[in-house]
Image (spheres, grey):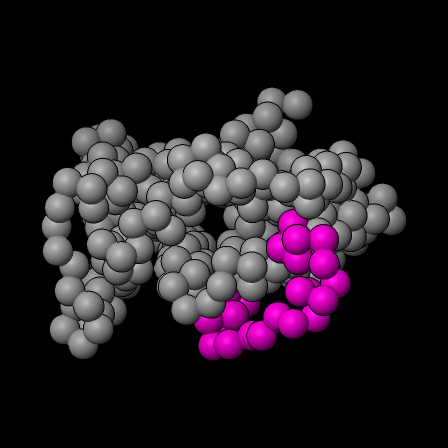
Amino acid sequence: PTAYALLIFNMALWGSSLVVARATHEIVPPLALTFWRWVFAVLVLLPIVWSKLPGTVPYLRRSWRGLLLLCAAMVVGSTFSVIAVNYTTAINASLINGSQPAVTALVALMVVRERLSIASGIGIAIAFLGILVMISQGSLELLFDLVFNVGDLVMVIAVLAWAFYSVELHRQPEHPSGDVLLFFIACAGLTTVLPFYLAETVYIREFVPSRNAAAAIIYVSLSASLVAVGLWNLAIRSVGAMHAALFINLIPVFGAAFAMLFLGERLFAYHVIGAVLVFIGILM
């Protein structure tokens, strides 16, 4: 029960960070947001893990390949998801993100031979139906009129990376402590994203620092990069990748709720129906 409660709180953090990113996308370009959030995460974690780093040398010698895979998957998933929402609609992104539980179940089957139970399969289908109700606004006509673009392909890659990260984290036998693992991921994030951030600055759009931009970066870093990823890691080790992935369907539910509270968006019946279906699917 504690792990499931943490997962719900985790999805609330991710949902709120998406609302912040969406509200500030005009002042903080996607790669700038991604790079500076990892920089801030490293600055926060460094004094916490400094004394623990020498003790990780034996782990790095034994398991550096597994750590590299985890860091790469997390960086690709988090970066591509931020990029995708700048080049596709929120509806398309939510629809593709709603496939996360099924994709994770497929990756788990291929990598660790973890089979999906009938009840879990029904739960995934019901939760995905809830996502469809919300993004289609209860209209089949709107659902059939969806047009996909290159941003959707980027979101698919992000979903695959998140699925691989979740399964690998659950599969690998040993890891450093949670704060040290987060520190390694954050270091990998800022070093990997740096050249792309510089290219974005030169060729696409320059990031102009401001008070609102700094507030957005700090919040997204604390909520999405530190607390949420840390809770996600704990939950995966506790309940498994497949069950944890089902809670990702709560992100658009919380995202819609926070958008109503802070961005003035309206509540409609399809929001309520979709959210109820998502909760039923998770209970299944």
Q: How many marks?
A: 0
Residue 216 image point, x, y percent: 27, 42
Residue at position x 38%, y 51% in the image: 22
Which of 67 and 190 lies nearest the eye of the viewer? 190
Percent position of residue 71, x then y: 39, 55
Q: Split into 4 quadrants, where in the image is the N terminus?
A: top right
The residue located at (15%, 64%) in the rendering is 206
Q: Quadrant of the C terminus?
A: top right
163 to 51, vertically: above or below: below
| Direction from residue 15 to residue 131 in the image, left or right | right
Frontmost residue, 58 versus 215: 215
Residue 105 position (above or below residue 202): above
Q: Residue at x 53, y 48 (%)?
A: 169
Q: Residue at x 69, y 45 (%)?
A: 270
Look at the image and tell me whether residue 154 can be seen.
no
Secondary structure that dominates the magenta span: helix
Q: Residue furthest top?
A: 2
Answer whether residue 198 is magenta in the image: no
Nearer-the-camera pick, 124 or 194: 124
**Residue 138 belongs to magenta span:** yes
Give whichever of 103, 25 is nearer the camera: 25
Residue 81 image offset from top left, x and y in percent: 44, 59
Residue 30 in view (yes/no): yes
Residue 168, percent from left and from top: 55, 53
Q: Is residue 46 above or below residue 184?
A: above
Quadrant of the rendered structure where residue 273 is?
top right
- Dividing the picture into quarters, in which one does residue 96 lie? bottom right
What is the magenta range?
Answer: 134-161
